[in-house]
Amino acid sequence: MTSNNHSSDIPDQRPDSRTEPRRIRDFFTVPAPIKRVFDRFPLATYPSNELPHYSWPTRYRNRLFVFSDAAGARRGRPSFNPQCLKWQAYLKFVGIDFELVPSNNHASPSGVLPFLLPALPTGTSTPIPSGKLQKWAIEEVHCEEEQQLNLRFEVYSSLLDNRIRNAWLYNLYLNHENFEAVARRLYVDPSTTNPLVRSVLASQLQQAARDELLKTSSYIDASALEAEAAEALEALSTLLGDDIHFFNRPNPGLFDASVFAYTHLILDSKMDWKYNRLEQLLSQHENLVQHRERLLKFF
């Protein structure tokens, strides 16, 4: 006799105590064809990446890992990256000897460049990130801590870290001509020969620049960025005045290195800029141009 209760058409969802253990075993059982593949190529857990190893011509030297090409690193030329150049210049200014190593962010333990491997103690493999380089340098050569010399240090540093840096990001990454002629040549092409990967890297670099600029504005206005950079350069020129170094220091310090990191690259013909409004703005301040020329002699 057929029942009129259609609920019997729905499978019973309650587990059968007799079949449940077998079902659990079946769920975790790898199908035979897949198991044979993994038997031939077993999974392996590899250790975390170590710092890159090199054969050094001079064994006991500090090694500063920066964005650079091999020829530039061998000759100690200024890095083409402002953050790297800032610390490269600072270490030179305070008299610390080091060897440049061309690198990239993927090789850095912190994910950013620069970082330094000190020569002493011998055999150390503990890197010093950029945020701790000044403290390390002070301990090495007992130089003055610049932030304590003048309370204006942080105020004027913000001009570099915000207004000038923002204009730099736009000029390098979001100006199409400059990106193709400068950024792609320096950051993208050396990373890989694969055209698809190059395209992805290029897109990521430009998007990262957009994201950074949109942190402080709802849209990106090139003329506004240039105007803010012009004001920052004028303020820096006024601060320097007729002095040889910023804050009237007898020797160049961290702030001099921070300014030089931008002024040198803005004026460097080897960068091969196609559009360089920042050079036009900087050239209006002769004392900043001369400051750059004086510090360039360290290299």
Image (cartoon, grey):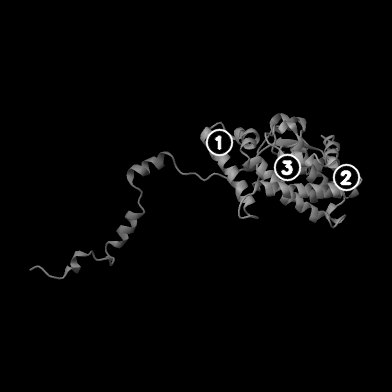
- At horizontal 62% and vertical 46% (from top left) the residue drawn is 209
Mark 2 to mark 3 CA distance (whole Å)? 19 Å
Determine which quarter of the picture holds residue 190: top right
CB within 8 Å, label 2 to label 3: no
Q: Is residue 63 left or right of residue 34?
A: right
Based on the displayed image, in which of its 4 quarters is residue 293 positioned? top right
Give the amino acid at mark 2.
His
Residue 215 percent coordinates (x, y): 63, 54
Residue ID for mark 3: 82
Q: Which residue is mark 1?
A: 198
> Quarter holding the C terminus?
top right
Per the image, label 2 sits on a secondary structure element best described as: loop
Query: Which of disc 1 and disc 2 is earlier in sequence?
Result: 1
Give the secondary structure at mark 3: helix
Residue at the (46%, 44%) spot, across then down: 43
Query: Crowding at label 1, few (<14), some or many (≥20) Cα neighbours within 10 Å?
Result: some
**Mark 2 and mark 1: Cα distance apart in space:** 41 Å
Q: Which residue is mark 2?
A: 245
| x, y percent for residue 65 | 71, 40
Q: Vertical placement of 264 versus 158: above or below?
A: above
Q: Amino acid at mark 1?
A: Arg
Relative to residue 210, is residue 97 depicted above or below?
above
Q: Is residue 148 left or right of residue 33?
A: right
